[in-house]
Amino acid sequence: MPLLVLQRLVSTIPVLLVVAVIVFLMLRISGDPAAILAGDTATSAQIEAVRQAFGFDRPIWEQFLGWIVQVLQGDLGESLFTGLPVTTLIAQRIEPTLMLALTTIVFSVLVAVPLGVLAAWRSGTWIDRAVMVFAVLGFSVPVFVLGYGFMYVFSIELRLLPVQGYTSPFVDPVAFAQGIILPTLTLSCIYIALIARITRASVLETLNEDYIRTARAKGQVERTVLFRHALRNAAVPIVTVIGLGVALLIGGVVVTESVFNIPGLGRLVVDAITRRDYPIIQGLILFFALIYVVLNLIIDLAYTLLDPRIRY
Amino acid sequence: MTAVVDKTAEGAIPPGDEPTPAPAAPASHLAGTLRRYPLAAFAALVLALIAFGAVFAPLVGTTDPTALNPAARLQGASATHWLGTDHLGRDVWSRLVYGARVSVVVGLAVAALAVVVGLVIGLFTGFIRWLDPIVMRVMDGLMAIPGILLAIALVSVSGASIVTVIAAIVVPEVPRVVRLVRSVVLSVREEPYVEAAVSVGTPLPKLLWRHVLPNCVPPLIVQATYVAASAMLTEAILSFLGAGTPPIVPSWGNMVAEGRLLFQIAPMNLLYPGIALAITILAVNILGDALRDRLDPKLAKRVGQR
């Protein structure tokens, strides 16, 4: 087993390498990187200075090697605007994003999985239809429309919750809870839609199996049949989608943080775009891609726990 | 939103769908499809209306969507301004109608480009064995980058215009199409008629065109609708974040972005374009689901319809 885990680990290297090449080339496909970094108003002498400072005058493979060695040492470069290392900026901003992601994942799974099981169990009825209508809706309503819709109803009309902002749970847990409710609801919708769809399809398939009939014939309580027998055997695709959905979640975080004015990594990206602070954009893309790949690797390896038939 | 995770090509287990089973019938007339799926027919009607409005924008009660009139700013709905005016006194209804043009163009262009590029790459990848692992690793790498971030970065390095926005949205959509086409090619490659064609020496391009391509068309039509929905969503998000269509162009994303400033005073200026966007994307998704049931019965069956 350790050998195969190692193999799986090694197989992520080419993916990460491709990501690194894409991020590296991004600045260079669209013309002169020195001119882009120097900005629209730079003189040719300033552009030349930037070219020298960043080493854009060296051969491209040499630049790439130098850059990749830096990245492997945990150096993502410095912000053009503040001069701070990108890794420092990420560390400063990661808490709100992490909290929002955690509350969203927990809330989504707690809502979506029972909803999907219910829809499969009562397939063809109005319950099933309602869940599926919600799933299509969740996919179609843009995150910011949801966010502003919730904000309009709960914060402006009903005045129940704060409009915007973020408070750390380590500072004031109550304010944190109040502030995180709407962003979590907003971000969860698409994720719930995705997970509920897969749960329904996957459980529906297992419900046709012989062991389900056997369990029922034994006189098992229906709840045990559904959750112990059906859901357990349907778990692998559900967990896979939870992992793949993290890509959706990352995109959603960027938007949700802008809507609710949360000072996390998403806002860091958006601010970097307006300031054309490319090292931050590049660093964050690498960072998010790494999280996505590592998370899905962990999920892959966790299959053995969920389904003993899968062996590494 | 956002990189909508593709709903047809995500591996062995496709997601669920409406419970009403569609009895398998070979005939596939559009009219028949619409009669069997009244919801999809309604969605098609809505999309036709939106397309009509986008094409004939000057004729549907609009004025110049960029004409400023600060004296008449933030007005409510009236006979002259059907949906009121925004913070610069521009007519919201006109901006909404002209904004549909951006969404329609982006949706269609991205769907067409992503399908064509993905199709060409997928066809050759599936058939040329040494190419396959290389191309697929590149696709894996592209898919590991969240689509919105990739698009944002591409627009920010190449400058914002409709063309760069379309190109930036196409890039993250291509890998999904490639995977779909490749999976079809891999299953078709072992079919006797393909082996026969190979053994009589059919050149590869002709083989792909005559024998493989037709098998890819039905799933691709379905995938194209999802790509269009996802593209419109991404365009709006890019504009919303200030990395999309240039602010002078009236687009739904830009309207939402501008509406943020005065959201607490005039929430409808943000919610109108948001709702328009949601309705459009919903209609495209409903149409896509109906097309999938109709054109891709294998997939519909795997979904678990009894």
Image (spheres, coloured by chain):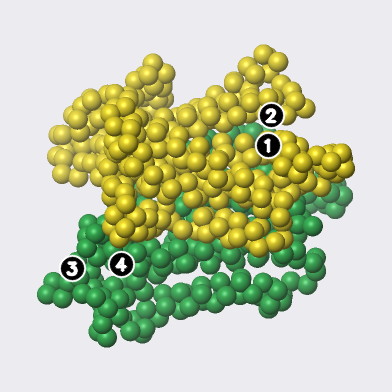
Chain colours: A yellow, B green
The residue that mark 4 highlights is B268
The correct choice, above or below, for B306 with respect to B88 in the image is above
Instruction: Measure how far apart labels 1 and 2 are at the Cα level.
Output: 7 Å
The image quadrant that residue A179 belongs to is top left
Check disc 3 and report the residue beneath it: B88
**CB contact under 8 Å: marks 3 and 2:** no
Q: Is residue B259 left or right of residue A68?
A: left
Left-right relation of B211 to A99: right
Q: Nearer the viewer, mark 3 or mark 4?
A: 4
Count residues near mark 2 (Cα–Cα under 10 Å), then give few for <14, some for 14-19, many for 20+. some
Q: Earlier in the sequence, mark 3 or mark 4?
A: 3
Residue at mark 1: A235
Secondary structure found at label 3: loop
Q: Nearer the viewer, residue A161 or B5?
A: A161
Q: Quadrant of residue A76?
A: top left
x then y, percent, for residue B200 = 85, 50
Name the secondary structure under disc 4: helix
Which residue is the site of mark 2? A306
Q: Do the residues indicated by labels 3 and 4 lie within the same chain of the protein? A: yes
Residue drawn at (24%, 59%) of the image: B264
Instruction: Give the chain letter at badge 3.
Output: B
Q: CA distance from mark 4 to mark 1?
A: 43 Å
Image quarter of residue A114: top right
Which residue is pictured at 34% across the width and 20% down the height?
A: A75
**SS at badge 2:** helix
Out of A251 and A65, give the one closest to the viewer.
A251
